[in-house]
Image (cartoon, helix red, strand yellow):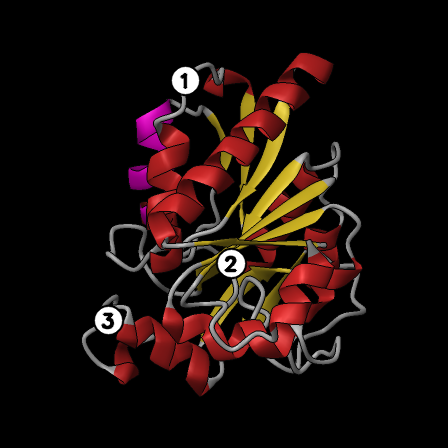
Amino acid sequence: MVLKLFKDKTALAAAAAEQAGTSIRHAIAEHGKARIIAATGASQFEFLEALTSLPGIDWKQVEMFHLDEYIGLPASHPASFSNYLQQRLIQKTGITQHHLLNGEGDPAEVIGRTSQELRQAPVDVAFVGVGENGHLAFNDPPADFETEEEYLIVTLDEACRRQQLGEGWFATLDDVPRRAISMSVRQILKAKRILCIVPDARKAKAVKSCFQGEISPLAPASILRTHPNTTVFLDQHSAALLDPTVLRSAS
């Protein structure tokens, strides 16, 4: 794992987008197609804006998978991650090969269908974030580090639900769904390359616990340290609580 530190979220996003673009172009050049996993949430705004502005990517050859979605939330809802990806990635690039998770569908059927598509070939690059509680996708602590299932039905903890409220997606905590479909930890780790985009001071405690503490289900994103090709992009605010020696030794 490599940790990279930037002065602000704009510089972070630009660097992460350049690396993402290089990975996508390389995959297309190598085998005619790039398979990606896309993250959502407020922390990914600048990254996706920078990524979709890059020249020279043949988005028609990109196949996109979706990390997680709330169960029971219509795609028209502002907090729907399907809606988010439509607005911030699909419509901007013209991606035609995408596998969005239907929050209103039967969860078992949605999981079965999307998992079958995911098994067809390796994922070239996964874009992920880290939650305020350290979650990876919607794998809240204690996360399941063992299951080989591609997607899981998960119950969201209060810290996770409060983050969604705090980001402005919902009017009240009661409005935040309690269950979601989430890509599993082990499935994320199967990606050839992982880019973890983590700006903002509100993520500093999670960054410290995941990248300086023990590798543990209680700090789900800490598992990224076991992946041989992961780069974590931090700004000075999200990295504020890290020991400087961690940054030096990791990069």
Q: Nearer the viewer, mark 2 or mark 3?
A: 2
Q: Is residue 171 left or right of residue 143?
A: left
Magenta residues span 84-93
Q: Residue furthest left?
A: 171
Q: Which residue is mark 2?
A: 129
The earlier-in-sequence mark between 1 and 2 is 1
Q: Which residue is mark 1?
A: 55
The earlier-in-sequence mark between 2 and 3 is 2
Q: Nearer the viewer, mark 1 or mark 3?
A: 1
* Residue 196 disc label: none
Q: Quadrant of residue 88?
A: top left
Q: Which residue is mark 3?
A: 170
Report x, y in % for residue 56: 46, 14
Q: Quadrant of residue 87?
A: top left
Q: What is the CA distance from the residue labelled 1 to the residue labelled 2? A: 24 Å
Report x, y in % for residue 178: 43, 78
Q: Looking at numbered disc 2 in the image, what kind of residue is underneath it?
A: Gly
On whether residue 87 falls in the magenta region, the answer is yes
Who is closer to the viewer here, 5 or 46? 5
Q: Is residue 65 left or right of residue 43?
A: right
Local packing at callout 1 (Cα closer than 10 Å; few below 14, some 14-19, many 20+) is: few
